[in-house]
Image (cartoon, rainbow, N blue to C red):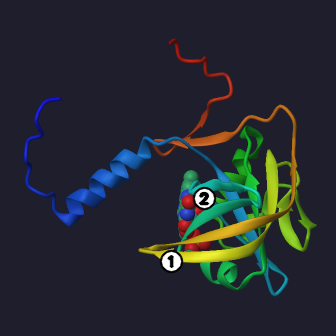
Amino acid sequence: MTPSVTEPAPTHSALLETYRAAMRHVAGTVYAVTTAQGGEPCGILATAVSSLSFDPPSLLVCINQAASLHGPLASAETFCVNVLGLGNRDVAEQFAQGRGEERFGVGEWEQWHGLPVLATAQSSFVCRRAHRHDFGTHTIFIGELLAARHRPHAAPLTYYDRNYIDISHAPACPA
Ligand SMILES: Cc1cc2nc3c(=O)[nH]c(=O)nc-3n(C[C@H](O)[C@H](O)[C@H](O)COP(=O)(O)O)c2cc1C
């Protein structure tokens, strides 16, 4: 191994810029995370979502504390993670452009377990909010699975370098 060269520590703003630039090149599946508050649907697009444990089956979502969904999610008993497929791009665009309830004006939304669930999503995970952990600008919400459903032969909507891309026909990398 070559000896490491000691470099001056980057400024905080340079570090943030490097972080943002590097994260732009991390491809992520696009999710619509939803809940309901006082009978009103609320939701945002997210890529910071992950499976957490097999038993109990659980997921985590990282939500900006400044996002409109944060308050409702912090007080909700349940939430839904909708995994968007290529056919849900119109829903992703409506979520990005719209506000509040108007985000649900595009797509086939139905009530399931009292939550707005996208009927045509690649898959949907209804969760009981089990735990939260605040860190920096975001909160990690952990959800324990109550119900799930998925469609066969789905192709994920993927976000990469500020664009939506289709990875469903991407060839396997040669070894
Ligand atoms: C592709 C994409 C992925 C996003 N991922 C997240 C995420 O993981 N967590 C998050 O808090 N916001 C994420 N956002 C931003 C939110 O969707 C939303 O735009 C932002 O929180 C402002 O929402 P508001 O107008 O409802 O407050 C993402 C936005 C886009 C377009």
Q: Is residue 29 above or below residue 80?
A: above
Q: Amino acid at mark 1?
A: Asp
Query: Can residue 62 be seen by looking at this rendering?
Result: yes
Query: Can residue 68 be seen by looking at this rendering?
Result: no
Q: Is residue 62 above or below residue 77?
A: above
User: What x and y, as percent, mark residue 59?
Assistant: 69, 60
Q: Locate residue 95: give its quadrant.
A: bottom right
Label 2 within 8 A of ligand 1 by Cβ: yes
User: What x and y, as percent, mark residue 124?
Assistant: 81, 54
User: What x and y, as percent, mark residue 4?
Assistant: 12, 40
To which residue does mark 2 refer? 46
Disc 1 and disc 2: Cα gap in Å? 17 Å
Q: Outermost residue, top direction?
A: 174
Q: Residues within 10 Å of mark 2 (few under 14, many from 20)?
A: many
Q: Residue at x 91, y 70 (%)?
A: 113
- 90 sits left or right of 46 in the view: right
Q: Secondary structure at mark 2?
A: strand
Q: Amino acid at mark 2?
A: Ala
Q: Regarding ligand 1, which quadrant of the image does it lie in?
A: bottom right
Q: Could you say which is closer to the camera, residue 163 or residue 170?
A: 170
Q: Is residue 55 above or below residue 44?
A: above
- Mark linked to residue 134: 1
